[in-house]
Image: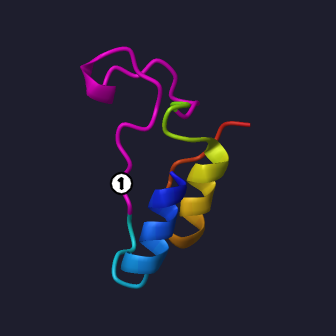
Amino acid sequence: MHALVSFLRQQVSGVVNTIHLLPFYPYSSDDGFSVIDYWAVDPALGTWAMRAEIGHDFPSDVRRRD
């Protein structure tokens, strides 16, 4: 996800204002659409902190449950 953040900031900042990340949550099958936990980030894709880093430049309505 660090590479994605870098790419977004360098290449599309100011041009794109929304990023749609899928699949984002841990899943069991169906290429990410059979979600196991809507409150977690798939560890293979990153962490909530990494997701929040993208959110600084590209706001989202995805929120972490505390």
Q: Position of residue 48 (x, y in %)?
A: 63, 44
- Whether 52 is drawn above or below 57: the answer is above
Instruction: Tell whether 34 sits left or right of 56.
Output: left
Observer-nearest of 31 and 34: 31
Q: Is residue 56 visible?
A: yes
Tell me the SS state at disc 1: loop
Characterize the magenta stretch by its predominant secondary structure: loop
Q: Position of residue 41 (x, y in %)?
A: 55, 34
Q: Is residue 59 visible?
A: no
**Quarter of the figure that contains the C terminus:** top right
In which quadrant of the rendered view does residue 32 lie? top left
Q: Position of residue 10 (x, y in %)?
A: 45, 78
Q: Is residue 35 magenta?
A: yes
Q: Position of residue 62 (x, y in %)?
A: 52, 48
- Whether 66 is drawn above or below 17: the answer is above
Q: Determine which residue is flagged by label 1.
A: 20
Q: Count residues near mark 1 (Cα–Cα under 10 Å), then give few for <14, some for 14-19, many for 20+.
A: few
Instruction: Name the residue furthest front.
Output: 3
The residue at 59%/46% (across/down) is 63
- Whether 11 is drawn above or below 60: the answer is below
Q: Please state the extent of the stretch shown in magenta in the rendering.
A: 19-41
Numbered label tally: 1
Instruction: Tell whether 20 sits left or right of 58.
Output: left
Q: Is residue 14 magenta?
A: no
The residue at 51%/31% (across/down) is 42
